[in-house]
Image (cartoon, helix red, strand yellow):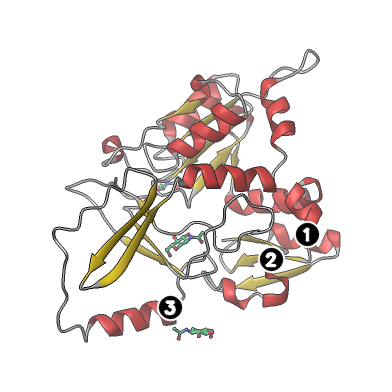
Amino acid sequence: MFVCVLYVYLNCLCVRRARCVAVMRGIVLTASHNPGGINNDFGIKFNCSNGGPAPDNTTNEIHALTTTIKEYRTVPDLSCPVDKIGVFNFNVDDRPFTVEVIDPVRDYVSYMKEIFDFPKIKALIQGTPERKPFNVLIDSMSGVTGPYVQAIFVSELGASSANVRRVTPLEDFGGAHPDPNLTYAADLVAAVKGGDYDLGAAFDGDGDRNMIIGRDALFVTPSDSLAVLAAHAAVIPYFQRSGVKGFARSMPTAAAVDRVAKDLGKEIFEVPTGERSMVPEAILDTTLEGN
Ligand SMILES: *[C@@H]1O[C@H](CO)[C@@H](O)[C@H](O)[C@H]1NC(C)=O
Ligand SMILES: *[C@@H]1O[C@H](CO)[C@@H](O)[C@H](O)[C@H]1NC(C)=O
Ligand SMILES: *[C@@H]1O[C@H](CO)[C@@H](O)[C@H](O)[C@H]1NC(C)=O
């Protein structure tokens, strides 16, 4: 597997969730949006307990620690079946060591069903006698989002397998450059332009970048997606339950969401990239954020 996600839900709604894994830190092994595979890129991402990227002072501290490492040990004969769901116990140096292998797709889908109104989206995608189906084309670019896209759009929302592309994760992303933009997802743009599609979307190798295009391949910048979401937060079940106290965006995100905040009379926070922690703790859970 080329992507190893060791974190699941950091700020989870334990009460409502069938399952909740709270973790302290997460490590993601991935080439992200770069060409991957044995002759290409590889990287390590580190996330803090709030799920967000590690701030500079944390990565600086990690770097400083790496310069003082004098030795490290390996356990070459510990073999854990990471392709099997379950809890595996080992004894390492006379100490218990536990590995829990989870199904992140199942957890993610059930969390998404708490946030969004799946029956309504399903009705939209499938159409009704009065309204034709809302035709989507979703491209996972052979990255880790494939099984999620398959589960959500095909199994849950009833789209057909012709509505999803490249949903089988490949170690080298099939030789492609999995950056979902107008250059590297040009074939998706051409397909949406030439076909009867209402929406197209693509994800990068590890699923933290996306591209959204509308009818006739109208490009929607992520800054505008955030503003659209913010403007419609009142119809999203998660925000109906929690209410929305304000919006936050990082400094390079365009200010479209600021206009929405002003219109709705909500607070808006501008924070440095990755500094999610700078949004006041008390309102974090009820803040719609964009990177
Ligand atoms: C986790 O951290 C990585 C590396 O900084 C970042 O790319 C990713 O977006 C973070 N995940 C979330 C959910 O913020
Ligand atoms: C990094 O900075 C934040 C905010 O200034 C602080 O809360 C946190 O403890 C710092 N982390 C480390 C590892 O120094
Ligand atoms: C697409 O991403 C690549 C880098 O990954 C960049 O070189 C290129 O300019 C981008 N194209 C557009 C249209 O944003």
Q: In which quarter of the image is residue 230?
A: bottom right
Tell me the kind of residue under disc 2.
Asp
- Tag 1 and tag 2, C-beta contact below 8 Å: yes
Viewer-nearest of labels 1 and 3?
1
User: What's the residue at 62%, 23% (across, down)?
Assistant: 135
Tell me the kind of residue under disc 3.
Asp
Q: Marks 1 and 2, how far apart in space?
A: 8 Å
For the N terminus, which image quadrant?
Answer: top left
> Percent x, y for residue 289?
64, 61
Q: In this view, does 15 lie above or below 179?
A: below
Residue at mark 3: C-beta within 8 A of ligand 2: no
State which tag comes first along the sequence, 2 or 3: 3
> Percent x, y for residue 45?
37, 63
Q: Is residue 263 above or below residue 130?
A: below
User: What's the residue at 46%, 75% (across, down)?
Assistant: 55
Residue at mark 1: C-beta within 8 A of ligand 1: no
Tell me, for residue 152, which label it has, or none: none
Label 2, residues with CA under 10 Å away: few <14, some 14-19, many ≥20: some
- Tag 1 and tag 3, C-beta contact below 8 Å: no
**Left or right placement of residue 291 versus residue 42 in this view:** right
Q: Label 2: which residue? A: 285
Tell me, for residue 56, which label it has, or none: 3
Dot 2 lies on which element? loop
Q: Marks 2 and 3, how far apart in space?
A: 23 Å
Dot 1 lies on which element? helix
Is residue 200 visible in the rendered image? The answer is no
**Left or right placement of residue 141 versus residue 77 in this view:** right
**Left or right placement of residue 289 versus residue 57 in this view:** right
Tell me, for residue 242, which label it has, or none: 1
Q: In which quarter of the image is residue 218?
A: top right
User: What's the residue at 58%, 71% (across, down)?
Assistant: 276
